[in-house]
């Protein structure tokens, strides 16, 4: 029969190992870009809440082969306003990563 102290020790060690494994794997993916609108000349102060684009969807897929991870990010932004919104797309990537393909579609083109 297993002593209660030995059983508690096994549970504690198992918990610590699972926690270490989780923390070792959990790293920020940074797979989300945003569009920062270039604001037209508004009266002061500008209506910032009305100038942002809505994110319609954000999809991330990752495939790993021979220790190389390929990440594909698809985002669709929606302009729900009666005026055109121009902006700067910002997409942070981690050190050592590179972008091999970048495509922008505007109005389906």
Image: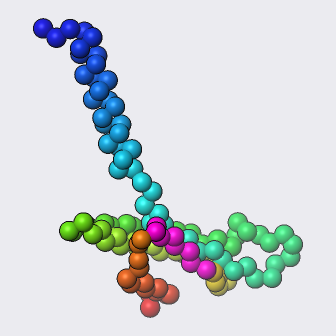
Most distant residue in the right direction: 44
Q: Is residue 82 visible?
A: no
How many circles with numbers are drawn on the protein?
A: 0
Most distant residue in the left direction: 1
The x and y percentages for residue 40 are 75, 82
| Residue at image location 46% in from the left, 68% down from the top | 95
Residue 67 belongs to the span the image colors magenta = no
Magenta highlight: main SS: loop
Most distant residue in the front direction: 96
The x and y percentages for residue 29 are 43, 61
Residues drawn in magenta: 88-95
| Residue at image location 51% in from the left, 70% down from the top | 92
Residue 93 belongs to the span the image colors magenta = yes
Quarter holding residue 28: bottom left
Q: Which of these two is toward me, 90 or 3?
A: 3
Direction from residue 53 to residue 14 in the image, left or right: left
Image quadrant containing the N terminus: top left
Q: Which of these two is toward me, 25 or 46?
A: 25
The x and y percentages for residue 13 are 29, 27
């Amino acid at each position: 029969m297993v002593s209660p102290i030995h059983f508690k020790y096994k549970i504690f060690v198992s918990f610590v190992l699972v926690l270490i494994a989780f923390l070792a794997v959990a790293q920020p993916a940074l797979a989300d870009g945003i569009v920062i609108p270039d604001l037209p000349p508004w009266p002061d102060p500008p209506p910032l809440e009305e100038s942002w684009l809505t994110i319609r969807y954000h999809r991330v897929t990752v495939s790993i082969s021979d220790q190389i991870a390929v990440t594909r990010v698809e985002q669709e932004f929606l302009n729900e306003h009666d005026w055109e919104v121009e902006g700067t797309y910002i997409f942070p990537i981690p050190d050592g990563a590179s972008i091999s393909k970048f495509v922008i579609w505007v109005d389906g083109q």
